[in-house]
């Protein structure tokens, strides 16, 4: 058995118990909110009107912002044995059919096999057949097999197109089996009408048909029935994962870049992950999944199933999760979390070695068939090699404690129970001693920053033009943004289009250039193309959210990218990938081995500080007007940075935080554990899990430290990662500090009736606030 780094934390088993059931009027009101606020989805609207189905009783479903635990029943009971797992697997499969795939009819027999074509080649034969089945023989699926010559039974790989991987497989001694089960050749489209009593959606219908393909393969004497594998990529990857969960005869599945709805959890991607989510998927591809899935847009914390549970359903059979490093529909951290969750089921069943990952360079479409076949060779015992998983995010809190030797005596940290930062009549002089103590606490949590030596002046200067920015690269004048070490922003700009928010005409009104600062960080400085020569521009640093593949870019949003909106409003915008994201994903793996007493958040704050210093020296930047605009994680980073750096003149934080002292596990938001157990943002906060009231500072104090500089907190009322009432209370406590400075109006709170996202309306209103207060 190979060693695995497992994330097993208390938060995985905790959930908020429902206090009461939602009433019918409340569910009707929720539907009305969806229809008013979420983007239009005519096909879904028609389904809802025809069915009359209301949103589920969310209060009857456990609230779990972390991944649902495959080894915990929905009612909270633990899975303690393989026998328990059989029952839990049945529960998950039932929930999966209810909320994601739809229900499946029983598998019918194949009534006849019709030979369509047979071609013989040098060392192989290709046979195309049509399988006829179902009521009145009205169901049919075309299958093509290519069988290499030679004695004995052979392994087979099923693909979702007729040709499959024929050339690569035959020369490796595999049978290639393809079927017409994709968007361009979908023989299963008729199944919806053929089985009207079942609501299985388009991708699950194709997955259901795989059973019939296997029935046919079982009749071929050349096929080894114990070595049947299946491969699918992108939407087909979602489908083959479902097929493997449905049919246990599939011995191995290669799920390529499935995105959400496959191996990537809905909870981890979506709007907060700057990628594809339930809202966008159900609107843009309304036939892929059962329509009721859309009810969970922004309510993923109430969805009883997710990608890690789908992979768990495949256990103990082999599964390879393949995805591209900068794959815009994937998410390296999220895929690794699926692995760490599902491998516990594989371990319970005695085969943790059968679950693996394959990460390849490139964007969506990156695939390595030969490596996938290498993996199949290992799983089928055709080689003595052993697969090695290379994790980008091997975070483990207990390992960090050993590295750092850090310990915390909780008795030295008094409890805080929502007391005010200042009295109503306080003056700035009353605040300064408290502010100094708060800064020390914040700096302690961020960790000890190693010394940063400024770059040495070169002995001689080479005269060369400045490096081009992504807008120039995307125009085709410099290099190739799709190379193996890609310029991700240039690739996004070159593609353009609504999915990335890089829209015309706004994108044609900016120029950019590379901007280097700090400890080897390279970003891009975007400038309004119509800026007057010699003008000193107010400048915003854009701090992105949890965007692992694309860094400071995003995808599947269909809203204008904030860089363009800010540039259109007259700001220069500095954008860069934060530590652990985008082009800098590889930084975080060895980070704590190198700096056990620092923190990832500390590095992020240092980057902001160094960016400010470099911007102040830039000839096109007004050094006295440098601001931060942060979304989700970026909003949090911005508050930390501004609290410690007075050169930052204002902050906008969108869905950036929930107060830590009240963010307990019972609220279902994942609690403070998300900072230290789930991810290694602030390891020292891990000592306070279960003792949150003893955390020595909170976000009200951080905002207070920024006073009297302007701060806008944008807290959507339906943000599943926050408790909006607690955010409001924190802002009001911080307002006492602003009043002490006579700056009450400089602290703003906007509470759109929305999920955590950054649509054009929120972007426009926040920029209007900036114009009024910056």
Image (cartoon, rainbow, N blue to C red):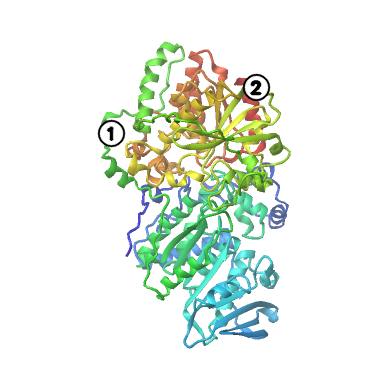
- Please report the residue visible at 42 percent of the width from the left and 30 percent of the height from the top: 456
Q: Which class describes the residues within 10 Å of circle 2: few (<14), some (14-19), or many (20+)?
A: few
- Whether residue 396 can be seen here: yes
The image shows residue 318, relative to residue 507, as above or below, that is below
The image shows residue 271, relative to residue 653, as above or below, that is below
The image shows residue 709, relative to residue 325, as above or below, that is above
Q: Which class describes the residues within 10 Å of circle 1: few (<14), some (14-19), or many (20+)?
A: few
Q: Quadrant of residue 4?
A: bottom left
- Left or right: residue 77 versus residue 261 is left
The residue tagged 1 is: 410
Image location of residue 511, percent across then percent down: 66, 35
The quadrant of the picture occupied by the N terminus is bottom left
- Whether residue 662 can be seen here: no
Local secondary structure at mark 2: loop
Q: CA distance from mark 2 to mark 1?
A: 53 Å
Image location of residue 455, percent across then percent down: 43, 31
Q: Nearer the viewer, residue 178 or 397?
A: 178
Residue 681: image tag:
none
Image location of residue 668, percent across then percent down: 45, 44
The quadrant of the picture occupied by the C terminus is top right
Badge 2 vs badge 1, beta-carbon distance below 8 Å: no
Q: Quadrant of residue 53?
A: bottom right
- Please report the residue visible at 67 percent of the width from the left and 85 percent of the height from the top: 114
Image location of residue 309, percent across then percent down: 47, 59
The nearer-to-camera label among 2 and 1 is 2
Local secondary structure at mark 1: helix
Residue 535: image tag:
2
User: Which of disc 1 and disc 2 is earlier in sequence?
Assistant: 1
- Left or right: residue 359 versus residue 186 is left
- Please report the residue visible at 49 percent of the width from the left and 39 percent of the height from the top: 578
- Left or right: residue 24 versus residue 400 is right
The image shows residue 363, relative to residue 356, as above or below, that is above
């Amino acid at each position: 058995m190979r060693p695995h780094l497992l994330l097993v934390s208390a938060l995985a088993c905790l959930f908020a118990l429902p206090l009461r059931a939602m009433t019918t009027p409340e569910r009707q009101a929720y539907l009305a909110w969806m229809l008013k606020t979420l983007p239009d989805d005519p096909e879904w609207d028609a389904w809802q009107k025809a069915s009359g189905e209301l949103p589920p009783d969310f209060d009857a479903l456990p609230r779990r912002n972390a991944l649902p635990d495959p080894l915990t029943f929905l009612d909270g009971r633990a899975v303690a044995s393989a026998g328990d797992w059989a029952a839990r697997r049945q529960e998950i499969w039932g929930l999966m059919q209810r909320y994601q795939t739809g229900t499946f009819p029983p598998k019918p027999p194949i009534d006849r096999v019709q030979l369509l074509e047979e071609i013989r080649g040098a060392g192989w034969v290709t046979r195309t057949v049509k399988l006829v089945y179902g009521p009145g023989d009205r169901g049919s699926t075309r299958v093509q097999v290519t069988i290499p010559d030679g004695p004995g039974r052979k392994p087979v790989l099923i693909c979702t197109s007729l040709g499959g991987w024929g050339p690569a497989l035959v020369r490796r001694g595999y049978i290639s089996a393809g079927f017409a089960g994709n968007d361009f050749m979908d023989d299963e489209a008729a199944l919806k009408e053929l089985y009207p009593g079942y609501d299985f959606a388009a991708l699950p219908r194709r997955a259901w048909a795989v059973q019939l393909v296997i029935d046919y393969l079982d009749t071929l004497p050349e096929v080894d029935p114990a070595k049947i594998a299946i491969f699918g990529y992108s939407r087909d990857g979602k489908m083959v994962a479902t097929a493997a969960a449905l049919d246990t005869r599939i011995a191995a599945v290669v799920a390529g870049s499935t995105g959400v709805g496959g191996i990537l959890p809905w909870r981890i991607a979506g709007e907060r992950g700057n990628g594809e989510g339930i809202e966008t998927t159900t609107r843009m591809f309304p036939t892929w999944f059962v329509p009721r899935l859309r009810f969970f847009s922004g309510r993923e914390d109430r969805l009883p199933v997710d990608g890690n549970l789908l992979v768990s359903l495949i256990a103990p059979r082999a599964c390879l999760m393949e995805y591209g490093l900068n794959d815009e529909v994937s998410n390296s951290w999220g895929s690794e979390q699926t692995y760490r969750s599902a491998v516990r089921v594989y371990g319970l069943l005695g085969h943790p070695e059968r679950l693996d990952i394959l990460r390849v360079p490139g964007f969506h479409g990156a695939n390595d068939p030969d490596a996938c076949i290498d993996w199949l060779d290992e799983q089928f015992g055709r080689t003595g090699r052993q697969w090695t998983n290379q994790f980008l995010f091997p975070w483990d809190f207990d390992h960090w404690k050993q590295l750092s030797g850090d310990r915390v005596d909780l008795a030295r940290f008094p409890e805080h129970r929502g007391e005010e930062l200042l009295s109503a009549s306080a003056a700035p002089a009353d605040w300064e001693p408290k502010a100094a103590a708060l800064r020390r606490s914040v700096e302690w949590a961020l960790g000890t920053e190693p010394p940063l030596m400024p770059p040495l002046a070169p002995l001689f200067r080479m005269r060369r033009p400045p490096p081009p920015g992504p807008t120039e690269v995307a125009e085709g004048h410099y290099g190739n943004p799709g190379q193996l070490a890609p310029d991700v922003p240039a690739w996004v700009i070159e593609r353009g289009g609504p999915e990335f928010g890089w829209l015309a005409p706004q994108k044609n009104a900016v120029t950019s250039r590379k901007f280097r600062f700090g400890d080897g960080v390279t970003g891009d400085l975007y400038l309004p193309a119509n800026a007057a020569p010699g003008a000193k521009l107010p400048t915003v640093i854009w701090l992105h959210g949890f965007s692992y593949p694309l860094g400071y870019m995003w995808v599947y949003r269909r809203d204008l990218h904030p860089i363009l909106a800010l540039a259109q409003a007259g700001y220069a915008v500095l954008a860069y990938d934060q530590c652990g994201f985008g082009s800098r994903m590889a930084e975080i793996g060895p980070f704590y081995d190198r700096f056990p007493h620092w923190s990832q958040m500390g590095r992020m704050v240092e980057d902001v500080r160094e960016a400010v210093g470099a911007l102040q020296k830039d000839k096109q930047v007004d050094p006295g007007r440098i601001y931060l605009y942060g979304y989700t994680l970026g909003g949090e980073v911005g508050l930390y940075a501004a609290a410690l750096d007075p050169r930052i003149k204002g902050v906008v934080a969108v869905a950036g935080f929930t107060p830590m002292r009240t963010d307990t596990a019972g609220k279902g938001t994942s609690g403070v554990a998300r900072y230290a157990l789930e991810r290694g943002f602030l390891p020292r906060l891990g000592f306070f899990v279960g003792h949150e009231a003893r955390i020595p500072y909170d976000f009200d104090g951080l905002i207070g430290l920024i006073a009297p500089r302007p701060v806008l907190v944008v807290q959507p009322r339906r943000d599943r990662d926050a408790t909006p009432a607690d955010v409001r209370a924190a802002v009001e406590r911080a307002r006492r500090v602003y009043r002490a400075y006579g700056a009450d109006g400089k602290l703003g709170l906007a509470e759109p009736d929305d999920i955590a996202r950054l649509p054009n309306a929120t972007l426009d209103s926040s920029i209007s606030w900036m114009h009024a207060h910056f």
